[in-house]
Image: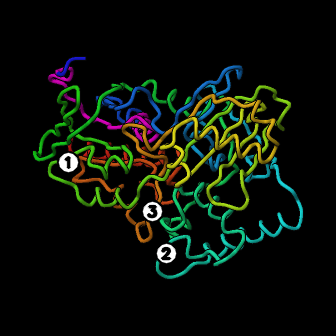
Amino acid sequence: MPRDDFKDADEDVVIIGAGAAGIAAARRLLAIRPGLSVLMLEAGDRLGGRAWTVGLPGTGDLGFDLGCGWLHGARTNAWTAIAGEVGLTVDRSPAPWNGGRRLQRDDAESQAAQQAIGAYFERLESHEGNDRDMAAKLQPGSRWNGQIRAIGTYITGAELERSSIVDYNRYDPGAGPDWRVREGYGTLISLYGAPVRTRLGVEARRVDHRHAGRISIDTNKGMITAGTVLVTVSTNMLAAGRIAFDPPLPDKIEAAARLPLGLADKIFLSLADPDALPADTHMLGSTSRGATGTYQLRPFGAAVVEAYFAGDLAHDLERAGKEAAFAFAADEMAGQFGADIRKQLSLAAISAWAATPHIGGSYSYAEPGASDLRAILAAPHDERIFFAGEACSHARYSTAHGAYETGVAAAELLAASFSKNP
């Protein structure tokens, strides 16, 4: 594509980023102001951002999500209704934490572990006063701290020492259990974005808002101008200065830096003999250490294992490469099912979100003292530059429906600004 591809291009609204927030904003904006010219720019080669579904051999029309996979707060999650609108199937089987099947003993030791884990989260929820890191509520020397640390990294994508108690306590995904989309959450979000006019492979590098009239966006495909801009890129990309603002927006960059992306990676393992493992059952790799995976055995009954790693372990496995990540998962599976299970397993798909260009991680967490910066990140600048994304959500950060809600909110503010300045 030539460098002057955007020669003389002028839009009412340019949306930077075609993930859940950008797509939701575009759809809402076009619904309430259909006369506007709206263009969505995406640096990657697909819609969806951190929602990414892949198909695996021998699994039919099932979709497997390398990014977000659960409709958290499904009864009030906007994506649940949208799934029906676009013809996809919501699977209402209970999640492991909502009463789904778990591979665990029900003996005195398991009960003691559950009591210790429950007591830790009660200590978090009863915290008052100044914000602290989540490790502050561990009981020194507790034999269950490894398991608590593992669960904590799955929640925030980062180690407890880096994660805010206040932010954790503000998290509220909404009413309802957690469900899945049989064809994939990424499939759902990309289908919803399909009607939006979008340019893939276009990286926004500089937003020039020095002048009272038009905003200039410098991209790898040339220059484009717009009346307003909506920025939905990840906090890691903002903090790294991947988009320069002229004049600078230091409050946004500081907020992004203190709301970094945690890391959660997935590996999908093909299973040669489905009968070797129970269907749709969850297991924890190790109950004694924080650096462990969590495993969904045969999701949807398929001959697949979904392994999930978070925090420092996920970073270590990304750096080590896919063979090392596969070996780690196979070792943990063998620890539960015996060495022969290794013969059943082969690598089917793997994510590496930290190394993914234009994203750089999985979902945001707040450093201690930084939870209020979500509102700073979300606030419009000069009614011409707007921001959205899961990190902008006060209570539904880290979720695709949190991203959706911030996109809709930004679209409504943006539409109102056009009403004031037609």
**Residue denoted by label 3:** 366
On the rendered image, what quadrant is the C terminus found in?
top left
Q: CA distance from mark 3 to mark 1?
A: 23 Å
Name the residue located 66 percent from the left edge and 70 percent from the top edge. 121
Q: Secondary structure at mark 1?
A: strand
Q: Nearer the viewer, mark 2 or mark 1?
A: 2
- Which residue is the site of mark 1? 245
Q: Is residue 19 magenta?
A: yes
User: How far apart, in angstroms, are the residues tagged by discs 2 and 1?
Assistant: 32 Å
Instruction: Give yes or no for contact between labels 3 and 1 (Cβ–Cβ under 8 Å).
Output: no
What amino acid is labelled 2 in the image?
Arg
Residue annotated with mark 2: 132
Q: Position of residue 109 (x, y in %)?
A: 84, 66
Q: Amino acid at mark 3?
A: Ala
In terms of sequence position, does the residue under pointer 2 or pointer 1 come before the other?
2
Q: Residue at x 47, y 44 (%)?
A: 319
Q: Residue furthest top?
A: 1
Locate the N terminus by quadrant.
Answer: top left
Please state which amino acid type lies under the numbered disc 1: Phe
Residue 222 in the image: state x and y as whole percent: 18, 27
SS at badge 2: loop
Q: Residues within 10 Å of mark 2 (few under 14, many from 20)?
A: many
Q: Which mark is residue 216?
A: none
Q: Secondary structure at mark 3?
A: loop
Q: How many marks?
A: 3
Nearer to me, 73 or 275: 275
**In the current view of this chain or complex, which residue is farthest to the front?**
339
The residue segment tinted magenta is 4-28
Nearest the viewer among 287 and 422 is 287
